[in-house]
């Protein structure tokens, strides 16, 4: 489903849709209603699944071949660190689950909206090009060449683009 979304919308827009899903999911789990909490957790799962599919695809189309392996390793490392941070945040949960005065769980779930929001804003304001591979598929050759020039030196970008 995520790869289809990436094909239809392009990688960048698929990220943006996924990030909106993540922000909405985080808002749902923070609200004080059990059904919204459950819906939010399902949406967070979908958001995570989409990210696991779209991130490697996006990076594979952007990253220079010389460093693809290193970037892929750091992607996995980042996901693992994110899970560790989630567990560490859970350490502050109250020992008495019936204690309504402790609202730490809301903060813990709300933190999940920070990274999708940051990525959404970066994609909206800074990273304005889709992947060069996707742009070439859409026959937007001029934009694809500009996108390559953002990653590579001008001469190498032209050489890669022409090959």
Image (cartoon, helix red, strand yellow):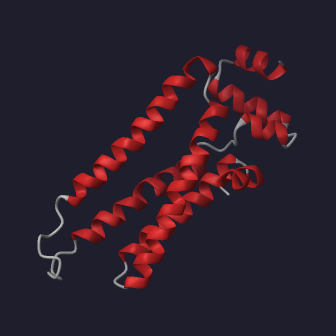
Determine whether 105 is above or below 114 in the image.
Answer: below
What's the residue at 43%, 72% (across, down)?
Answer: 27
Q: Nearer the viewer, residue 123 or 68?
A: 68
Residue 160: horizontal and vertical position, in percent?
Answer: 76, 19
What's the residue at 63%, 32% (across, down)?
Answer: 60
Indicate the quadrant where residue 143 lies: top right
In the image: residue 158, left or right of residue 98: right
Indicate the quadrant where residue 81 lies: top left
Number of marks in picture: 0
Indicate the quadrant where residue 68 lies: top right
Determine whether 66 is above or below 91 in the image.
Answer: above
What's the residue at 47%, 64% (across, down)?
Answer: 44
Residue 116: horizontal and vertical position, in percent?
Answer: 48, 56
Q: Quadrant of the C terminus?
A: top right
Residue 6: horizontal and vertical position, in percent?
Answer: 70, 50
Q: Nearer the viewer, residue 45 or 33?
A: 45
In the image: residue 133, left or right of residue 45: right
What's the residue at 40%, 39% (across, down)?
Answer: 78
In the image: residue 64, left or right of residue 108: right
Extreme residue in the left direction: 95
Q: Nearer the viewer, residue 146 or 96?
A: 96
Determine whether 1 is above or below 139 in the image.
Answer: below
């Amino acid at each position: 489903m995520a790869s289809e979304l990436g094909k239809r919308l392009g990688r960048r827009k698929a990220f943006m849709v996924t990030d909106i899903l993540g922000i909405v999911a985080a808002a749902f789990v923070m609200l004080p209603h059990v059904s919204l909490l459950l819906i939010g957790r399902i949406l967070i799962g979908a958001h995570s699944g989409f990210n696991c599919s779209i991130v490697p695809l996006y990076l594979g189309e952007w990253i220079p071949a010389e460093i693809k392996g290193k970037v892929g390793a750091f992607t996995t490392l980042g996901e693992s660190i994110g899970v560790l941070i989630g567990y560490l945040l859970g350490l502050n949960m109250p020992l008495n689950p019936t204690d309504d005065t402790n609202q730490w769980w809301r903060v813990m779930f709300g933190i999940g909206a920070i990274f999708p929001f940051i990525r959404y804003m970066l994609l909206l304001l800074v990273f304005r090009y889709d992947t060069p591979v996707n742009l070439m598929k859409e026959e937007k050759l001029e934009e694809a060449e500009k996108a390559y020039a953002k990653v590579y030196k001008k001469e190498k970008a032209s050489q890669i683009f022409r090959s």
